[in-house]
């Protein structure tokens, strides 16, 4: 069975600095998708970034980028130029590329942004 | 703008009550999901549905059932609420191969 592990329950970053959130996963599949979701205090979960496993190039969305290391089964999220609005819970998620629409989520990392 | 609406933001129920949590999406998505979110445990899948009247158990289906009579609506039912079902419940929907769209959650307290 697939698993997703986020080993950092909480992280802090100074405004305008860069922070990296860690995520590792375990799977025997070769075709899958990885996601980072953000849950602000409003509780509305939104997609931050998505990575297809077959793509070697790391996904980037504005200030958010990932470091996808397929062999190491690692999928970290880098937030550059951190802003107060980035403060939230961040969840790493895995979805198989075939056979099921189940998403598997990590336990989350709470990010605090210090002014 | 796409929307997933959960009927209640906060709900307080008594032990033994039958509880209905409703979720409606306006995006014509095939897939709908119910997750439970607890501190330190992340999101755990209770049930999901990939079509009308179709459902599959997730990782923690015990004590819950679901109903999907119409494509846009996915209901989570607690047949006899217990205190260990106090939690945040999140509904989500997606197209076949796309990202999840989430509702804003229902915080359920069972007393």
Image (tube, coloured by chain):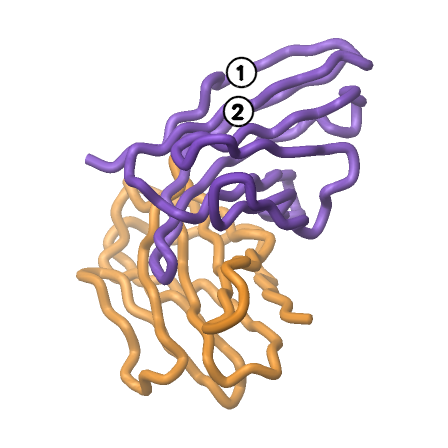
Q: Which residue is drawn at 28% across and 39% down?
A: B27
Q: Chain B is drawn in which colour?
A: purple
- Classify mark 1: residues with Cα within 10 Å, few (<14), some (14-19) or many (20+): few
Mark carried by residue B106: 2
Q: Is residue B29 above or below residue A56?
A: above
Numbered disc 1: secondary structure: strand
- Quadrant holding the N terminus of chain B: top left
- Quadrant holding the C terminus of chain B: top right
- Which is more toward the observer, B39 or B51? B51
Q: Is residue A115 left or right of residue A101?
A: left
Q: Chain letter for orange?
A: A
Q: In which quarter of the image is residue A1?
A: bottom right
Q: In this view, does A92 lie above or below A98?
A: above
Numbered disc 2: secondary structure: strand
- Classify mark 2: residues with Cα within 10 Å, few (<14), some (14-19) or many (20+): many
x, y percentage for residue B19?
66, 17
Q: Residue at x 61, y 76 (%)?
A: A26
Q: Is residue A63 above or below residue B88?
A: below
- Inspect this view and state whether residue B84 appears: yes
Mark carried by residue B10: 1
The answer for which chain carries disc 1 is: B
- Which is more toward the observer, B19 or A4? B19
- Which is more toward the observer, A32 or B70? B70
Label 1, label 2: how far apart the Cα atoms are: 5 Å
């Amino acid at each position: 069975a697939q698993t997703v592990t986020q080993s950092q329950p909480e992280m802090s970053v100074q405004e305008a600095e860069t922070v990296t959130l860690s995520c590792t996963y375990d799977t025997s599949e070769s075709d899958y998708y990885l996601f980072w979701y953000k849950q602000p205090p409003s509780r509305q979960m939104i997609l931050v970034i998505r990575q297809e496993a077959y793509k070697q190039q790391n996904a980037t969305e504005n200030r958010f980028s990932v470091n996808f290391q397929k062999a190491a089964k690692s999928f970290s999220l880098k937030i550059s130029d951190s802003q107060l609005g980035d403060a939230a819970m961040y969840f790493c998620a895995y979805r198989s590329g075939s056979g099921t629409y189940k998403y598997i989520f990590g336990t989350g990392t709470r990010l605090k942004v210090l002014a | 703008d796409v929307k997933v609406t959960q009927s209640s933001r906060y709900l307080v129920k008594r032990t033994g009550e039958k509880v209905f949590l409703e979720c409606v999406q306006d995006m014509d998505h095939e897939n709908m999901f119910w997750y439970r979110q607890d501190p330190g445990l992340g999101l755990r899948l209770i049930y999901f549905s990939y079509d009308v009247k179709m459902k599959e158990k997730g990782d923690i289906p015990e004590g819950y059932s679901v109903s999907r009579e119409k494509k846009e609506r996915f209901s989570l039912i607690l047949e006899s609420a217990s205190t260990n079902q106090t939690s945040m419940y999140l509904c989500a929907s997606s197209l076949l191969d796309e990202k999840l769209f989430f509702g804003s959650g229902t915080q359920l307290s069972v007393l």
